[in-house]
Amino acid sequence: MTALEPFGARLRRAMDERGPLCVGIDPHASLLAEWGLDDDVRGLERFSRTVVEAVADRIAVLKPQSAFFERFGSRGVAVLERTVREARAAGALVVMDAKRGDIGSTMAAYAEAFLHRDAPLFSDALTVSPYLGYGSLSPAVALARESGTGLFVLALTSNPEGGEVQHAVRADGRTIGATVLGHLALENAGEEPLGSFGAVVGATLGDLSSYDLDMGGPILAPGIGAQGATAADLPAVFGSAVRNVVPNVSRGVLRHGSDVVALRDAAERIAEEIRAAVTPA
C-alpha cells in the first residue's frame, strides 16, 4: 500500500490555504425535514451531495457522521461511500466521524474499514474512542502511520456526560483526559509541521489551562454555533494550541438549507471569522 503524505502535513496545508474549518455532514431526520427532504435514502443522497457541491472545494475538512448514513442500511452506506469519494475528489479532507473503539482484531477491522487505501469508505482520518484503554487503539495507530491517515481521539468532549470519565483522576494524580493527551503527545513527537494524531476537545468547555493541549497534533473542536461557543472564544479555551484547532460547525452552516450559494456563503463567512480569531495580531 502506497502511503499518502502524512495526514498532519496535509491538514496543516489545507488549514493554511482554506482556513481552519470543519463542516459536519449530519443528515438527521429533523434537518432533512427542514430542507424539505424525505427521511429516506433519496433525501439522504440529495442532502449529502448538496453539501459536497457547496463547500468541498473551498473548506479544509468535511466530517460525515457515519450513524446518520448507517441507519438506512446498505443503501445509506453506499451514499456515504459516494459522499466521501466526491468530497475528497473536490479537495476536502474527510474525517469520518464513527467514534470506533474496540480491541485486537476487531479494532484492526474497524481501522481497515476507514483507513485502508483500498476500502470503499477510505477517509483521511477517523474519530476513535480510547476508553477501552489507549493501547486498544494500537491497530488503528499502526494503520494510520502506514497509510498516511490520521486519528482524532476522544479526549475532552463537549457532552456533559463525558466528564464523569474524562475528568476522573487516576492513582498518579492525572485525569483520564490528560492521560489521553499525553499519549497523543508521544505519538506526534518529532512530527512537523503537525502530527497526524489529534484530540477531540470541546470548544464549550471554558478554561482548559490545567490541560496541556500542545500535544503536537490537531484538535477537532465541536461546539461552535448551536452548542453555544463562538469563534471569539477559541483563544481563551485553547491558549497556545489555538493555531492547531479545527473547529467543527454543522448547524451553523446546514441551517441555511438546500441553497448551494447560501451554504457556501455561510461556510466562507464562518471560516473567515475563525481565521481572524486564531491568527495572532
Image (spheres, rainbow, N blue to C red):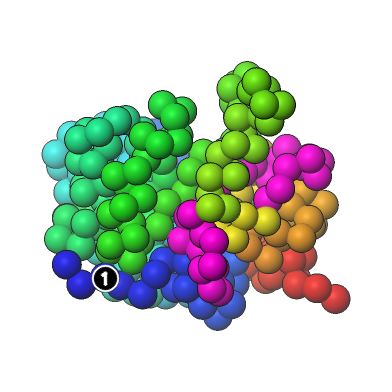
Observer-nearest of 187 and 108: 187
Residue at horizontal 59 percent and vertical 45 percent from the top? 182
Measured as percent of width and height from the top left, residue 206 is found at: 78, 40
- The residue carrying mark 1 is 3
In-image side of 35 versus 112 (left or right): right
Look at the numbered disc 1 and give the secondary structure of its residue: loop
Residue positioned most to the front: 172
Q: From the top left corner, tell me how far across and down residue 18 is, in percent.
A: 55, 76
Which residue corresponds to the image point at 46% horizontal and 61% vertical from the top-left?
A: 196
Tell me which residue sits at (61%, 49%) in the image.
221
Residue 219 position, x and y percent, is 59, 53
Look at the picture and state if 122 lies above or below 5: above
In the drawing, does residue 193 fall left or right of residue 203?
left
Label 1: how many Cα within 10 Å (few below 14, some 14–19, many 20+): some
For the view shown, which residue lies furthest in the right direction? Answer: 281
Q: Which residue extends farthest bottom?
A: 17
In magenta stretch: residue 48: no
* Spot occupied by residue 204 in the image (x, y as percentages of width and height): 71, 40
Residue range (magenta): 187-213
Q: Quadrant of residue 258?
A: bottom left
